[in-house]
Image: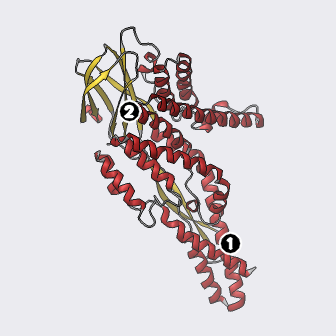
Amino acid sequence: MNKAVHKILGIILLLGLLSCASGPKTFEEIDASVSEGSYAEAVRGIENQRNVRGSVYNPDRNAILFYLDRGMVNFYAGFYSDSSRDLEEAERLIEEAFTKSLTMEISTFIANDNAREYPGEDFEDLYINVFNALNYYNRNDMEGALVEIRRANEKLTVLADRYERTRERAISSDPNIDTQSVTEAARFSNSALARYVSLLFFRSAGRIDDVRIDYEELHRAYELAPAVYNHPIPRSIAEEQSIPPGMARLNIIGFTGMSPVKEENNLRIPLPLPPPNSSALVSLPRMVDRPSGIESIEVVLNTGQSFNLELLEDMGRVARETFSARYSNIVIKTTARSIIKATAGAVSARAAEERGGALMGFTVGLMARIAADASENADLRMSRYFPAHAHVGGINLEPGVYSITVNYYGRGRNLIASERRDNVSVREGVLNISQFVRKR
């Protein structure tokens, strides 16, 4: 039994040393490049980090993060073919990781969550198809875009089914349960952004019934997750189902800010064990926002017409709510794992004391505590370069060529930045999307 305990401690220390390097190291330069709009430079930074020992882009366990982050930065840079390849590879790896989830989960009880391959979050998997649809649109490949829309809708169906099963189980266990609390527990089971993009593409394909379904589901997304959608539905949504004869519709999508990131929060909990194993280190992740400072967005056309973009989806809130839904499980598993390690250390120390005296027992216990602490690192992995917010707006225009200026305002209507785009063709009977990105 003593040999088994020592072997377990050895494994804990080894896996801890292997896994502790998987947290973020230095993102400052990449973040700065993305924030400043130097996207090609940011792509190079991500690629360089992949070859750095201990990088969060380590291909063994974090390949999904590499392709997600590079794919999104390629999207901002306008490298739409490269972005598609990256996002499609991330999607393939997420599907592959799902089949290995049970084996990976077992390893996390021995070392920590960093010991497993990063499997991706539901919202990351869904946003892959949303942005890839825009990639294909920008490459004038509407068929490819519709394939991505169908994949997004399939994933939304899975999320909805999961929500319904959760709701049914809750109600069957307690018929008097507050259905509103069940709805809030679902957190994120639909996406207004995905429904909006789907609506636009189906409208361009003449699939009127699908347009109606997406319109209804977009409203349903707001109803089911008030914690995520705590803002009004954009007024322009009501105009998307009908365009006056002889007119063309221009849709603007504005992506702002950068998604939240995770930081490590360490604490020690006391245990009824003899020193030095009388406490255990619990290392937990916490979500931290990266504010952009943009309060409102105005679109001005060279005709003098103007309108504001309205918030459709707070993508940062989606990330936070998804994290919150899993946080209690993270706390329970992390705490249990830390207690088990401390207990194993105490047992090992007691065995050593019986053989070699108090000093030997204390030394072994101390080594066990150091090994346990070294193996505890919060899992801080998540994609870093999805936007924080998606804003939308639209206007019916005479078919033609226009110039568009997008003004970004901060508090007090202070102008932060402007972006002008000339020679924007707005054609009748086709999808006309202009997307703008501002990271700060």
Badge 2 crowding class, 10 Å Cα cut-off, few under 14, some 14 to 19, many 20 or more, is some
Q: List x then y, in percent, for residue 222.
A: 53, 28
Q: Is residue 111 left or right of residue 76?
A: right
Quadrant location, the N terminus: bottom right
Q: Is residue 64 above or below residue 80?
A: below
Q: Earlier in the sequence, mark 2 or mark 1?
A: 2
Q: Residue at x 23, y 17 (%)?
A: 303
- For label 1, the SS is helix
- For label 2, the SS is helix
Q: Is residue 379 visible?
A: yes
Q: Residue at x 38, y 46 (%)?
A: 73
Marks 2/1 in contact by CB < 8 Å: the verdict is no
Quadrant in the rendering for residue 4: bottom right
Q: Is residue 9 left or right of residue 387?
A: right
Q: Residue at x 54, y 23 (%)?
A: 214
Q: Nearer the viewer, mark 2 or mark 1?
A: 2
Residue type pointed to by label 1: Thr
Q: Is residue 103 left or right of residue 114?
A: right
Q: Is residue 379 above or below residue 152?
A: below
Q: Which residue is mark 2?
A: 138
Residue 343 image label: 1
Quadrant location, the C terminus: top left
